[in-house]
Amino acid sequence: MPRLNKTVILTLLIASSSVFLVFQLYYYRHYISEHGIYTSINKYRQVENDVQLQVVKKFLGLVSRYNLPVFLIDTSTLANLSQHPANSKEHHSGQSVCRFLCTYREFTTFAVFAKFWKYDTSFAQAALDHGLELLEVRGKDPRLMGLDSLSGTTILLHLLFSSKSHCIHLVLFYERSGNYLWHGPLRLKAGADAKFVPFQKLEFGRQSGAFDRPELTLTSVDGLDVWIPKNISQFLQEYTQARFLECRYREARTFYQLYPDDTSLEAMDFRMKAKSLLSLVAQTLTGLGIPFWLSSGTCLGWFRQCSLISYSKDVDLGIWIKDYKPDIISAFQMTGLPLKHKFGKVEDSLELSFQGLDVKVDLFFFYEEGDIVWNGGTQAKSGKKFKYVFPRFSLCWTELMELKVRVPCETLDYIEANYGQNWNIPVKSWDWKSSPANVEENGVWPVREWREVIQDCSRTALGLLVMC
Ligand SMILES: *[C@@H]1O[C@H](CO)[C@@H](O)[C@H](O)[C@H]1NC(C)=O
Ligand SMILES: *[C@@H]1O[C@H](CO)[C@@H](O)[C@H](O)[C@H]1NC(C)=O
């Protein structure tokens, strides 16, 4: 009798068990679609799980063939990884368990730096060979849009790889001039996504987003080698507030046609100084972990003209009072920005002003109260208090003068509250006590508090000697 070779037996065994597995898979699908019920949720989930892991494997196989350095940004998997580090994975009889990648969601999200993406006509076919149907989503390149040109060329924004039951969403991250990463929104012509996961379900792409460049690390997740952000909690934190707003270049151009830009040396000089001041202040506040947004005239300049209003002469920023830290003043002083004045106190109407080179920066602290927020103003010579009331808003990223900064997402509401319906018409004579649409008188500081709440370092208030 011919000696049955061990390898042959093994091969036969594997083959028959694979056939059995395929049969099982088929059976479950068939059963479920026939009867529309689940015999056992757990068994069904197991199958669904296996499918998810298989699709991720296929995708990783495909991208490694094309040397595409993708990294995992799926928030569900990352959240689990941060709680149970992947390296502490248990091995069950040599089989890796799908603990992290099997999220019971219809999609798994990866990212790639756009500069590594090289389009190759063979790619879509190779994807198909891996059982993945490819869908490309394109959009305008915002980096080429600006006041000079609105003709942004089209770039690839998202790739969707769809198998029958699972979708891999690959997000392209572009580098932008403020040294940050940007991804575009995911929009399709009606019906084009029929075969794919409904787009509203995907977690990246409902709107564009901005991220700091994450440091990546290679780790083993469910037995697969995957790059992930090294500081997962930082990435997840950024994800919750990543929404990005593009400047309204088209409207800004129309504005400049009506009101030509001031190109005098003085105006250029102001913009240059204001830009470096803003950059310095942004660094300082970010270093302190204090989020801020463009407020008042600086916000109006961004919204209306994608620039700074040259005759405004200062930079205005908003900060939540809950983010106030006493070391702001010393931190600013250390970067060469001395305190110019401090009005109000932490409990009420706080406002700090620092003197840069010819340009000052005002930090307005915002108080939350029911469905409104407000910041205060103080008139040094009279001790009169003012209040500026805004509807509540959330914060979005944007870019101003090649800097990544925040603005209220509901920018129009914010601007209209502050400047009224005619915000689109430049006003050069502006009185902070009476011009704003949302200013309210708010009483007078008691004289005994003046020493604390009116600290004007550039002059003395009503003969009071003030220490700064
Ligand atoms: C994540 O963790 C939870 C609880 O530890 C677990 O039930 C779940 O299966 C894990 N996996 C995923 C991918 O959500
Ligand atoms: C990760 O980021 C968080 C928040 O940004 C930070 O507090 C923490 O120190 C970082 N962890 C490491 C290990 O760098």
Image: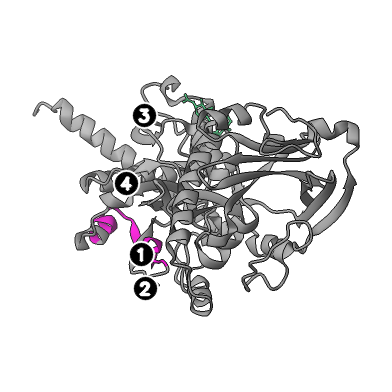
Tell me where the magenta segment starts and ends, as one range. 125-146
Q: Quadrant of residue 118?
A: bottom left
Residue at horizontal 58 percent and vertical 45 percent from the top: 360
Q: In terms of secondary structure, where does tag 2 sit?
A: loop
Residues tagged 1 and 4 counted as in contact (Cβ below 8 A): no
Residue 126 in magenta stretch: yes
Q: CA distance from mark 4 to mark 3?
A: 16 Å
Q: Which mark is residue 58?
A: 4
Q: Which residue is identified by label 1?
A: 144
Residues tagged 1 and 2 counted as in contact (Cβ below 8 A): yes
Q: Quadrant of the N terminus?
A: top left
In this picture the colour scheme is one colour
Residue 203 in magenta stretch: no
Disc nearer the start of the sequence (4/3):
4
Give the residue type that dot 2 points to.
Ser
Disc nearer the start of the sequence (1/2):
1
User: Looking at the picture, how far across and down is residue 33, in whole percent?
Assistant: 53, 58
Residue at horizontal 87 percent and vertical 49 percent from the top: 442
Q: CA distance from mark 2 to mark 4?
A: 38 Å
Q: Which mark is residue 151?
A: 2
Q: Which residue is identified by label 3?
A: 220
Q: Is residue 416 above or below residue 440?
A: below
Mark 1 or 3: in front is: 1
Give the residue type that dot 1 points to.
Leu
Give the residue type that dot 4 points to.
Lys
